Image (cartoon, grey):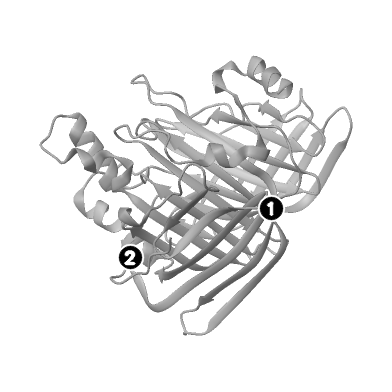
Amino acid sequence: MPEITELAEQHPELRLRPADTRAIHVHNRAAWTEELGAYEWWELSALDANGSGLVCSIHFGDAFSPAYRRSVRQIRAGRFIDAALGRKTAAVSLRVAVLALGRLAARSDLALDPRSFVEPDADAPWSIAFEGGRLAGHGEGWRLALDAPCTTTGWRHVLQPRLAAGRRLSVQLTLAPRFHTPCYLRQFLPDSPAGALHDWLPACPCGSASGTIVWSDAAGQRRTLILDDADGGMDHFRGSGPIGEGLRRFFTARVCWPGGAAIGELIIIRKYIQLAPSLMIFAQGEPPRIIRGDRTPRAEFQRSAWLLGYPMTLTWASERDGVAVTHAISRLADASPCRIAAVSRASVRVESASREVRLDDQPGLVQMFQPPRIDAFPWQRWCRPVPAPPGSTRRE
């Protein structure tokens, strides 16, 4: 892939390696590493023009679980603790947020039985199965099917997540790439001095999501959201050691348009030390681009009803490269102790040799990941996903 070779020469710090999108399922397999503190998660998102959709992440070795992180630290310190608690097979979880018109409609935030996490043999099509759900290759794309209980929403979830009595969430969603483009594995966090590596595979930068999402609201009424050709994407994150040693916040943002997509990232380490933002641009018929954005002033934050801070706008811009993507965030859609999600209205300006894209008021999705820094036992109890209820069904 000459496009990736050229990108790798331009950005040696990102450890870029080719990943053919037509054989992407080979890269999705979970048998990457079993080291202490290893983790990975698959994240599928879908968003239509009205700001409705979902964000679903399946964690194998939950990098944001305080209990998992604490076990890893204790094992490293030589404490007498079961070494298996520091392996990713000890922490499996599911996080789903359903958005309706830009607001959180339902959530499922569950700690799953690790024994329910199943992969097929190497010769079989790629898939992962877990309690009540399955994410699998479907033609050139993916299919997500799950049936899970809902958990509490809003400030109650931040204080102490628990199951919402009698409420369930069902998803049947198909994601297909809108176009094929050279893709890559890349670094998404700085490598640690201890040698931990952190990889990001944008498996589907720009996709079409279709299907149904059914949930029961607080009054017990069934609600149905039908997605038809909504903007979607899928990412695969994986690491060989604990995530975010020194990481304070990790922002990602995605916006799609006909024939292209822009995925932004912004990392804040320690206390308000902001690394240079970067923007990945994918377009039909063009090689991918990585743009190092101009350094911008620290984002102005706003606060939610439960006093959680999040930015009012996020901007990735490079005057030298003729690129500017701005996400304006009017309100927070979803919040959990380690992740927030917001629907944005994005403005896009992308200049290239063959075309120019200028868009305003484009729906986009912004997320902020924040590894827990508090190690007190009550915080571990409150902010980790709730256990799945007894008698949960297992699907192979």
Report the residue marked by disc 2. 388
Cβ atoms at labels 1 and 2 below 8 Å apart:
no
Residue 186 drawn at (x, y percent): 56, 28
| Residue 349 image label | none
* 374 is higher (above) or lower (below) than 344: above
Residue at the (33%, 21%) spot, across then down:
194
Rounded to the nearest whole Å, what is the CA distance between mark 1 and mark 2? 30 Å
| Quadrant of the drawing holding the C terminus | bottom left
Mark found first going from the N terminus, 1 or 2 = 1
* 276 is higher (above) or lower (below) than 160: above
Please name whichever residue, 281 or 83, is drawn nearer the observer in this view of the structure.
83
Q: Quadrant of residue 73?
A: top left
Q: Residues within 10 Å of mark 1 (few under 14, many from 20)?
A: many
| Quadrant of the drawing holding the N terminus | top right
Q: Amino acid at mark 2?
A: Ala
Please name whichever residue, 287 or 252, is drawn nearer the observer in this view of the structure.
287
Residue at the (35%, 51%) spot, across then down:
92
Q: Amino acid at mark 1?
A: Ala
**Is residue 299 something that shows in the picture?**
no
List the single residue furthest toward the front: 123
* 236 is higher (above) or lower (below) than 360: above
Mark 2 element type: loop
Report the residue marked by disc 1. 176
13 vs 20, left or right, is: left
Residue 244 drawn at (x, y percent): 39, 34
Please name whichever residue, 276 or 296, is drawn nearer the observer in this view of the structure.
276
386 vs 232, left or right, is: left
* 190 is higher (above) or lower (below) than 215: above
**Is residue 22 something that shows in the picture?**
yes
Residue 257 drawn at (x, y percent): 77, 48
Mark 1 element type: strand
Residue at the (52%, 41%) spot, across then down:
28
